Image (cartoon, coloured by chain):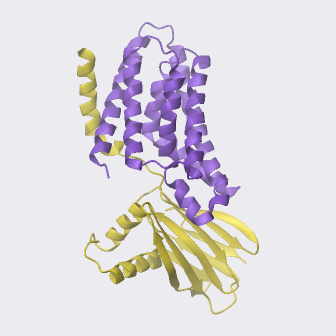
């Protein structure tokens, strides 16, 4: 249980300090018009990034970390641009779900490999599940932090302007991340 | 056009703070340690790039041009300096690295610390990679007396004691 708790904390810290995941989440949350609308988007993201984690843990899937990191940066740019250009955000769960696979690979990365080396395949689940649930907890925390502000602004005329400005920031930060990660390609 | 100008403006602002936008990794190492009657055995795994960055600092910024033997000695000295086992509140055990295995992303050491007497208490200290990252955590799964306990060594808490 202690191992589970420790990895839960590591997962929680990882998402709260991992601004790339935060920027992506923020991009998804700020355009949501209701919690009901946000639910499928976040659920799709959760299911797919958890799937990548399991696929990576079982050795079925292995992505090059440099490519994964560049794709995560691209997902941030994409979400920001979509916020700016699309009037209606229908079927956005497809986008969050699709990019969830990539973010999941970024979350789990070589953590799984390291655990496998030491604990063996059969004993890695407790830390891996703890790590993943820590990430989910961090995600829920961010939603509860950001969504009320978006909700309060829902009928304000300047909401569009705020969303656009935040999205511009998201695109710019995503582009910087993309450039930095492509430059440091191994 | 205005939007593109805004994006470019923000891009350059972000670029100014790009060092703080660098990729954030999980900074951990992971070990399994078993305390037996008169020895402490186990394995410890580091992310390869982290370990070699630490090794480079340890060797005064130089890591190229070392012979294989010098390389092995350096790895041994680094671990010996940062990972210590004291038993029965008096004896520091000497480290023996049985072997080390590297893959693309990680480096694993199998080790043993031998004692000349029966082990009653163990004091573990692990400070590996703390010089690299403030949030580095060295996770240990300890096995002793048919019990299992996990411990996280951090910069603020790098020593742990168990009574057998």
In the displayed structure, B141 sits above or below A27; it is: below
Image point 29% across, 35% down: which residue?
A: B14
Q: Is residue A79 left or right of residue A56?
A: left
Q: Which residue is more in the foreground, A57 or A184?
A: A57
In the displayed structure, A92 sits above or below A186; it is: above
Please indicate, yes or no, whether residue B80 appears anywhere in the rendered image: yes
Q: Is residue A134 left or right of residue A154?
A: right
Chain coloured yellow: B
Q: Residue furthest right?
A: B146
| x then y, percent, for residue A117 | 56, 64
Image point 70% across, 85% down: which residue?
A: B37
Q: Quadrant of residue B81?
A: bottom left
Q: Which residue is more in the foreground, A181 or B121?
A: A181
| x then y, percent, for residue B17 | 29, 40
In the displayed structure, A22 sits above or below B52; it is: above
Image point 53% across, 67% down: which residue?
A: B158
Q: Where, quadrant-wise, is the N terminus of chain A in this rendering?
A: bottom right
Chain coloured purple: A
Q: Is residue A6 left or right of residue B144?
A: left
In the displayed structure, B65 sits above or below A171; it is: below
Q: Quadrant of residue A12?
A: top right
Please indicate, yes or no, whether residue B88 appears anywhere in the rendered image: no
| x then y, percent, for residue A129 | 64, 48
Q: Residue furthest bottom?
A: B116
Image point 33% across, 39% down: which residue?
A: A177
| x then y, percent, for residue B87 | 62, 83
Q: Residue furthest front?
A: A60
């Amino acid at each position: 249980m202690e191992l589970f708790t420790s990895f839960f904390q590591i997962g929680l810290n990882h998402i709260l300090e991992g601004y790339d995941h935060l920027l992506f989440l923020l991009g998804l949350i700020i355009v949501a018009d209701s919690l009901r609308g946000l639910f499928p988007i976040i659920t799709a993201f959760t299911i797919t990034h958890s799937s990548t984690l399991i696929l990576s843990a079982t050795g079925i899937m292995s992505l090059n970390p440099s490519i994964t990191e560049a794709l995560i940066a691209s997902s941030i740019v994409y979400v920001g641009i979509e916020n700016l250009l699309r009037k209606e955000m229908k079927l956005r769960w497809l986008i969050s779900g699709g990019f969830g696979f990539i973010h999941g690979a970024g979350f789990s990365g070589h953590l799984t490999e390291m655990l496998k080396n030491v604990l063996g395949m059969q004993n890695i689940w407790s830390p891996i599940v703890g790590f993943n649930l820590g990430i989910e907890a961090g995600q829920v925390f961010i939603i509860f932090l950001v969504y009320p502000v978006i909700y309060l602004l829902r009928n304000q005329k300047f909401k569009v302007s705020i969303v656009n400005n935040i999205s511009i920031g998201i695109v710019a930060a995503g582009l910087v991340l993309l450039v930095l990660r492509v430059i440091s390609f191994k | 056009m205005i939007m593109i100008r805004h994006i470019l403006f923000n891009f350059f602002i972000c670029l100014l703070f790009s060092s703080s936008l660098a990729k954030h990794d999980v900074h951990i190492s992971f070990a399994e340690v078993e305390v037996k009657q008169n020895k402490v055995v186990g394995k410890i795994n580091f992310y390869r790039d982290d370990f070699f960055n630490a090794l480079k600092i340890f060797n005064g910024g130089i890591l190229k041009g070392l012979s294989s033997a010098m390389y092995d000695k350096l790895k041994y000295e680094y671990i010996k300096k940062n990972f210590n086992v004291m038993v029965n509140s008096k004896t520091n055990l000497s480290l023996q690295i049985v072997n080390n295995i590297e893959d693309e992303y990680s480096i694993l050491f199998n080790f043993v610390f031998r004692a000349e007497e029966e082990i009653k208490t163990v004091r573990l200290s692990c400070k590996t990679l703390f010089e690299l990252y403030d949030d580095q955590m060295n996770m240990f799964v300890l096995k002793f007396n048919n019990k299992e306990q996990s411990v996280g060594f951090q910069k603020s808490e790098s020593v742990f004691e168990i009574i057998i």
